[in-house]
Image: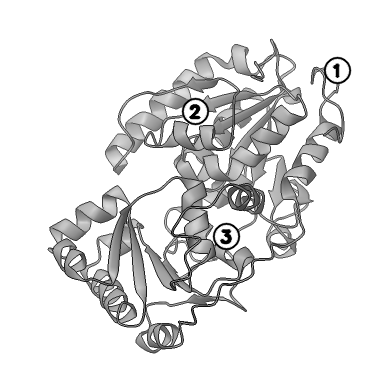
Amino acid sequence: MSVSPCQKPRIVAILGTRAQVIKMAPLLASFEHRHIPYRLLMTGQHQETIDELLDEFGITTPREALYEGREIKGIAQATFWLVRTAWRLWRRRASWAPSPRKHTVVLAHGDTFTTLLAAFVGRITGTTVAHVESGLRSFNWRHPFPEEITRLLVLGVADIAYCPGTWACRNINRRRVVIVDTQANTILDALRIALDRPHTARSDSDIPYAVVSVHRFENLYSRERMRVILDTVDRLAQRLNVVFVLHPTTKKRLSELNSLEDLQRNPNIELHSRMTYVPFMQLIAHSRLVITDGGSNQEELSYLGIPTLLMRMATERQEGLDSNVVLSRFDPECITRAVETVDTDPSRQTIKLPPQYPVDIIVDDLLTRLPESKLQGAQRGEG
């Protein structure tokens, strides 16, 4: 059943990227399940597959578009989009942030340009700014860039910090912001949803395989790093089948480097276009090794316990680093060990996810902070 926003909702989620949608969708679904009205404002930073992802999680609240142009790529385009979207939010503030504005909670997630937009417009308009996935730090402003800087700026204006664990909580000054430990990242709830869905043929296969997914700008546009990544994929394909998931930017860059045809000719490498969340999680859940440069993937794979080679120089996340996740730092010896020790046993693996439910912690906390009379029909703990 569709949950239409009430006249004066007190929760406003401002999202714009695929990663934000994936991590926030379980929270939005919980709002709808508990009949808690909210506004869903979409900045349009990403356009491709956004609606498919929201549909995949069953989100029925109307999506209010702030921008409907082309997907944001490049600094110049991002700057123009950021200013225009911020102005549009400010101009419409009476609609999405009714008085008294401090009773409206703006949910800003993660470390993107949309996060900056949501947090700063929320602060300027006088709302309560809640930062979901707060406290993650690499303590190196260059890695990852600009995410590390974004998190610091957002923390400077946030009122509530929803932190995915004790380590993240310790990275925040308690005198400046209210800290709530969600015990894990909301992506754990998203992962549960994905694994509960009917599985694809590949994820049910007994043939062992590895998965490769790289898309970060600092890797794609470094010839040296791409040479290391492609050499690693080639060596891995000598040991077992490899599913190489091609993001549009990755495919374009591989073509520019004249490497796409080499991958296509390798019989042990299967090139697959980018998937939506559920099939991709089901794919990696039964893989023997995942090579990735994604921070969200690091978290998902840490919960799954799948051996992971993280192709980055630094990470702002701690999940899995002492167990199944190896931060490569593009060190040849480290990469060789990961490839040579990959499990090729055809027997299937058992998946046991951690017991935490971070979305429930966030929703319960929000209900204590907002007047229940403003949350029409909200019932604490219902469902």
Residue matched to label 1: 373
Who is closer to the viewer here, 49 or 12? 49
- For the point 26% across and 69% down, the residue is 226
Residue with the mark numbered 2: 42
Give the Cα separation between the discs numbered 3 and 2: 24 Å
Q: Does 106 appear above or below 360?
A: above
Figure quadrant of residue 336: bottom left
Residue 148 in view (yes/no): no
Residue at the spot x=35%, y=64% of the render?
243
Residue 5 lies, in percent from the top left, at 66, 16
The residue nearer to you, when weighing 61 against 176, is 61
In front: label 3 or label 2: 3
| Mark sitting earlier along the chain (2/1) | 2
| Amino acid type of the residue that numbered disc 1 sits on in the rendered structure | Ser
Dot 3 corresponds to which residue?
300
> Taking 322 as reference, is 336 above or below it?
below
Query: In the picture provided, is 327 more to the left or to the right than 137?
Result: left
Mark 3 or 1, nearer chain start: 3
Q: Classify mark 1: helix, strand or loop.
A: loop
* Place of residue 276 in the rendered image (x, y in percent of width and height, measured from the top left): 44, 45
Q: Alpha carbon of mark 3 to alpha carbon of mark 1: how far?
A: 37 Å
Residue 91, compared with residue 198, is above or below; it is: above
| Mark 3: amino acid | Glu
- Mark yes or no: residue 126 visible: yes
Mark 3 near mark 2, Cβ–Cβ under 8 Å? no
Quadrant for the N terminus, please: top right
Quarter holding residue 39: top right
